[in-house]
Amino acid sequence: MDKRKLLAIGITIIFLITPIVLLRATTVSTPKFSLSKPLRVACVGDSITEITSYTSDLQTMLGTNYSVNNFGVTGSTVSLDSYKPYIQQQAFQKAENYEPNIVVIMLGTNDAHSYLEQYNETFEQDYTKLTHSFQELDSKPQIFIVESPPVFNNSLGLDPTFFSDTIIPHIQNVADTQNLSAVDVYDAFGNQSNYTVDGVHPNDEGSTLIASQVCDAITLQDDSGSNNPAS
């Protein structure tokens, strides 16, 4: 075989091998990134949390970097003197066992029942007990306190005036005193009773509004780097 044929064969072999070598080099040099677990979001509340689409809307808005779970209990209250304190419900224990990175608490609406007005003075104390229980978790969650939507009528036995003049200020005081992030759903609803199905429980539009307010609060905190990483 003459030298020209040997040279041609050698060049052909080089062209055939080079892509394979480059491919191997690229594969070896590319780092493998492991995705972190989604941040666990525990939505704590009453029927406005349990039976509406707010939590599913929130999951959609937050995306796959978060895992939203609904721990709402219909009829539950902040007050420990009611027939159904949230902190005494199984959902509360389940929320703690979930070891959340983020806790969104939206309670207080049922505390506007007339029979609970006499326990008004202990509302903030009872609310603080609830928030402290979550703060003591190993996951050290970021806690958001939601100022619940307005009560537009008393058809369900709730006092709209007592709710706006007493309960909402109490919720604001708890957030301020404990330096917790507050989500103002109350003002976001304004006078739009058409966001509810019965003057209290939000319809689909109202649920989306709640989810939007909560999502904005969470992502704002996340952008500032104050949320704990998932563990």
Image (tube, rainbow, N blue to C red):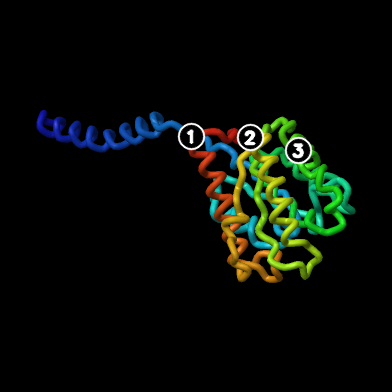
Which corner quadrant holds the N terminus? Answer: top left
Q: Which amino acid does label 3 sit on?
A: Thr
How many residues crowd mark 2 within 10 Å: few (<14), some (14–19), many (20+)? few
Q: Which residue is drawn at 51% across and 42% down?
A: 220
In three-dimensional space, the C-alpha distance between marks 1 and 2, rounded to whole angstroms, equals 36 Å
Q: What residue type is labelled 2?
A: Asn
Q: Quadrant of residue 76?
A: bottom right
- Mark 1 or 2: the one toward you: 2
Q: In which quarter of the image is residue 135?
A: top right
The residue to which callout 1 is attached is 33
Q: Which numbered dot is residue 179?
A: 2
Q: Which residue is drawn at 65% across and 58% down?
A: 149
Q: Which of marks 3 and 1 is nearer the N terminus?
A: 1
Q: What residue type is labelled 1?
A: Phe
The answer to the question of whether label 2 and label 3 lie on touching residues, with beta carbons closer than 8 A, is: no
The answer to the question of whether label 3 and label 1 lie on touching residues, with beta carbons closer than 8 A, is: no
Q: In this view, does 135 lie to the left or right of 86?
A: left
x and y percentages locating residue 21 in the rendered image: 32, 32
Q: Which numbered dot is residue 128?
A: 3
Q: Is residue 178 visible?
A: yes
x and y percentages locating residue 143 in the rendered image: 65, 40
x and y percentages locating residue 80 in the rendered image: 86, 45
Q: Quadrant of residue 112?
A: bottom right
Q: Earlier in the sequence, mark 1 or mark 2?
A: 1
Residue situated in front as seen by the camera: 161 or 208 = 161
Q: Can residue 90 be seen in this view?
A: no
